[in-house]
Amino acid sequence: MFKAINTRKIYLVRHCKPQVQEGTHLCIGKKDIPLSDKGREQALQLVKYFSDYSIDGIYSSPLKRAKETAEIVAGKEYNVVTKSDFSELDVGKWDGLSFDEVKQRYPKEYEERGNNLENYIVEGGESMAMCRKRAMAEMYKTINESAGDIVIVAHAGVIRTILSSLLGISMNKTFNYKIDYGSISILNYDDKILKPHEIGLSILK
């Protein structure tokens, strides 16, 4: 099948590895953590991947781990446009804690959130449904104000909310897909319809 002339590709990239302790599973939302040295190496692999494609613009969450990934991919060729509504899910008072710490300090809340992943709001934060609403609005706004194929660097939570919306599945079911650091989910935009083409493509070595 040939590619329709008006089909655009939206490359939805999860930021590369941030400065977190190896082997620690952290609950990170708006906490602003930069890339690690490993993350910068991973971003250079993304540069090589995108060198084979014609990209017309690069957009990013303003959080350091995403913006830095985007800036490495952009090099001197593009200006990175930051969009606050591509920021990671706000996890409120849990931000920066390990999941083990969350379970120990807030066992009841942890269980309640697990039973209602869509709508549960951690104190000081937002629900997945709220995050999905802002991320999808920003997605279409960004598409409408741009042209051609674009890269958007965001976060696992945001990417999962977008997939949930586009696939018509619950947030729980998005965990059937791996969204690793530096992975690429390719969306096709054709005749004002946005559809996932490939999810969680990993090109990192």
Image: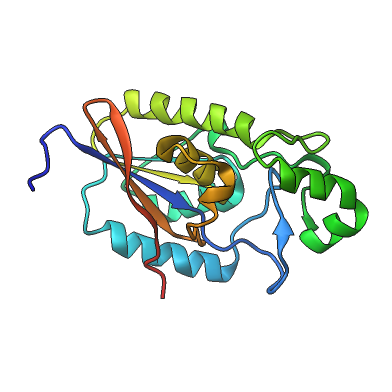
Image quadrant containing the C terminus: bottom left
- Viewer-proximal residue, 155 or 75? 155
Q: Identify the image quadrant of residue 44.
A: bottom left
Q: Relative to the observer, which residue lies in front, 178 or 83? A: 178
In the rendered picture of this protein, how many numbered marks are placed on residues? 0
Residue that appears at 58% across and 53% down: 65
Estimate the x, y position of residue 95 in percent, counting from the top left.
77, 48
Task: Provide residue 34's location: percent of width, then percent of height.
Answer: 63, 56
Q: Residue furthest front?
A: 115
Name the residue rendered at 53%, 65% in the picture: 39
Which color scheme did the rendering employ for the protein?
rainbow
Q: Pinpoint residue 81: horizontal percent, then vertical percent.
A: 44, 35
Q: Nearer the viewer, residue 100 or 35?
A: 100
Q: What residue is shown at x 52% (from left), y 60% (from top)?
A: 16
Residue 147: image quadrant is top left
* Left or right: where 62 falls relative to 119: left
Residue at the right extreme?
105
Decide if residue 1 is on the left or right side of residue 175. Answer: left
Is 116 rendered above or below residue 39? above
| Residue 135 in picture, x, y percent from top left | 52, 32
Residue 138 visible, this angle: yes
Q: Is residue 152 above or below residue 135?
A: below
Residue 80 visible somewhere in the drawing: no
Residue 127 left/right relative to 112: left
